[in-house]
Image (cartoon, rainbow, N blue to C red):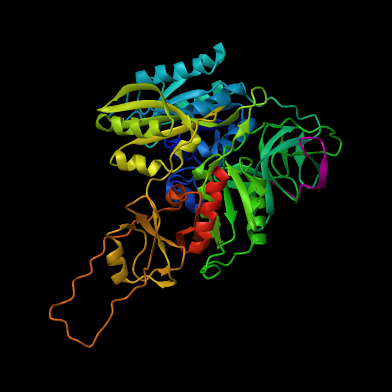
Amino acid sequence: MSMRNLAIIAHVDHGKTTLLDQLLKQAGTFRENQAVAERAMDRNDLERERGITILAKCTAVEWEGVKLNIVDTPGHADFGGEVERILSMVDGAILLVDAAEGVLPQTKFVLGKALARGIKPIVIVNKIDRQDARHEEVHNEVFDLFAALDATDEQLDFPMLYASGRQGWADEVIDGPRKDLSALFNLILRHVPEPGLDATLPFAMNAAILESDNFLGRILTGRVEQGVARLNMPVKVLRPDGTQIETGRLTKLLTFRGLERVPVESVQAGDFIAIAGLSDATIPDTICEPSVMAPLVSVPVDPPTLAMTFRVNDGPLGGREGKKVTSRQIRDRLAKEAEGNVAIRVTVSTETDAFEVAGRGELQLGVLIETMRREGFELTIGRPRVLTRTNEETGEKEEPFEEVLVDVDEGFTGVVVEKLSIRKAQMQDMRPSGGGKVRITFIMPSRGLIGYHGEFLTDTRGTGIMNRLFAGYQPWAGNIEGRVKGSLISNSDGEAVQYALFALQERGTLFVNPGDKVYEGLILGENSRENDLDVNPIKEKKLTNIRAAGKDEALLLIPPRRMSLEQAIAYIEDDELVEVTPSAVRLRKRYLDPNERKKNAKRSESAAA
């Protein structure tokens, strides 16, 4: 069967997975009366809860006798590693751009990767049914972006469609019939080239996706780059440097049909394949016949820019809420994650029972921590920090910088520019984007963005939108101020009492409710002043046998500030940790004993001097 391999790429929330729902539906993948969940490709709980794609996933449909292998990719910059490795499997791409939001940072990232691989994308201006759609300006923005990314003349001559993924139509002209997606299917057949790989050579493929299955074990997915894969054929596994690490047999061959993987006897060069039967092969190893001597070329992935320390939970409540609490269990889980996620790097920390986990951003590592929490792990997480490097030519210390694109109402531009300037941001561009909004572009250190997003939403009354993209390394930008306010710290163990919290809420913003378990060193809230303050949250009202003349005051508490996992990680300072368990996210000091904290503060001051 003739086939086409393509990926759907775009900025986060521009409609990739929703469009793919309609492609599957109109290609006849589902029965007429079949109940199908919205965003069918977002299969795990976190993807459904957050409304974003986290993992790249393959599917396949048939159109006019041609098999279309399609890869749904994440749109968030933190999951860029998924996009980079998946582009090696495809010969074409559909670039989605929102008709109102236009070109955003991640659009630039994914398009740059696709153009560098020689792919000639199809551009779709999606969500054309929006009231604030501006298709002509967006078309010009896309063309300018292609030109800025040094696209060839062939790539600049891209075909374009106007579409609404939710309504399930795509047309070549803005006022077309708006009936179905047949124009897109036919354009894919005309524009995306066939794989054109040699089926006469010995079998070889690169592993691009690694998954675990309860019945089949480790499943490796990739594209057959040459030859034919046959069931039970003997194979060997080569590392990118040519080292042989394993031999085995292909005990299971699976290819894609709609949302399912179906077993087959053989798979030709150019088709997507999922294989089982190998215990050590991983991404981006070459799986091939024994006669193949050299590994296939693998695409290098951009290095991590941010790191966190994962430690065992050594607090007083450790081991009470989770099932997996030892450093060995944490190490094995992180090693398994690093094996399947090429954008994550795990090393043993200098601290006891701790591991350094490096990734692309707070969201990527936050998703990993949330996944581990739901699996029953208990751990403590340190403050995120950027990974610096030394420029070999100049000897200067360099740090990662990001391009930050902010959409805010005109009335909030002053406060946003002021706050980001304090964090060493340099404004590159400011222009009105319609509807009383202003679009501002900054270049700033990644370090300055840690912990800023919550403050940004507060400053813009929840109406601002901030997008960011890694822009490379630049010289160290100097000191950046951290959190201004101190913490309210518990000096006792027990359960928080309403009487005590009523007195404490005048001191600042509380994070706990009456009845919550507390211990010495736990952060109860944010102090209204700069210093840390040790307080007693379990103090009860003294009772006497003398009747009071008046009634007791009603102890009304302001609802506590509850933080999500990502907010907690962004909030903490260097001397604080986030305690993560299956049932709670708590903030605590690194050193629980107040005397230890004072000693450590003195050591830090003398070291700085």
Residue 248 in magenta stretch: yes
Viewer-proximal residue among 42 and 477 = 477
Location of the C terminus (image quadrant): top right
Q: Position of residue 71 (x, y in %)?
A: 56, 36
Query: In this view, which residue lies farthest toward the right?
Result: 291
Is residue 323 visible in the rendered structure shown here? Answer: yes
Is residue 41 visible in the rendered structure shown here? Answer: no
Q: Would residue 304 appear left or right of 523 to someone viewing this image?
A: right
Viewer-proximal residue among 266 and 303 = 303
Residue span colored magenta:
239-253
- Residue visible at 45% across and 60% down in the picture: 586
Residue 50 in magenta stretch: no
Query: In this view, which residue lies farthest toward the left?
Result: 549
Q: Is residue 453 above or below residue 174?
A: below
Question: How many badges with numbers are in the image?
Answer: 0
State the image quarter where residue 181 is shown: top left
Query: In this view, which residue lies farthest toward the top?
Result: 153
State the image quarter where residue 328 is shown: bottom right
Q: Position of residue 587 (x, y in %)?
A: 45, 58
- Residue visible at 24% across and 31% down in the picture: 411
Q: Position of residue 453 (x, y in %)?
A: 40, 41
Q: Is residue 471 above or below residue 361?
A: above
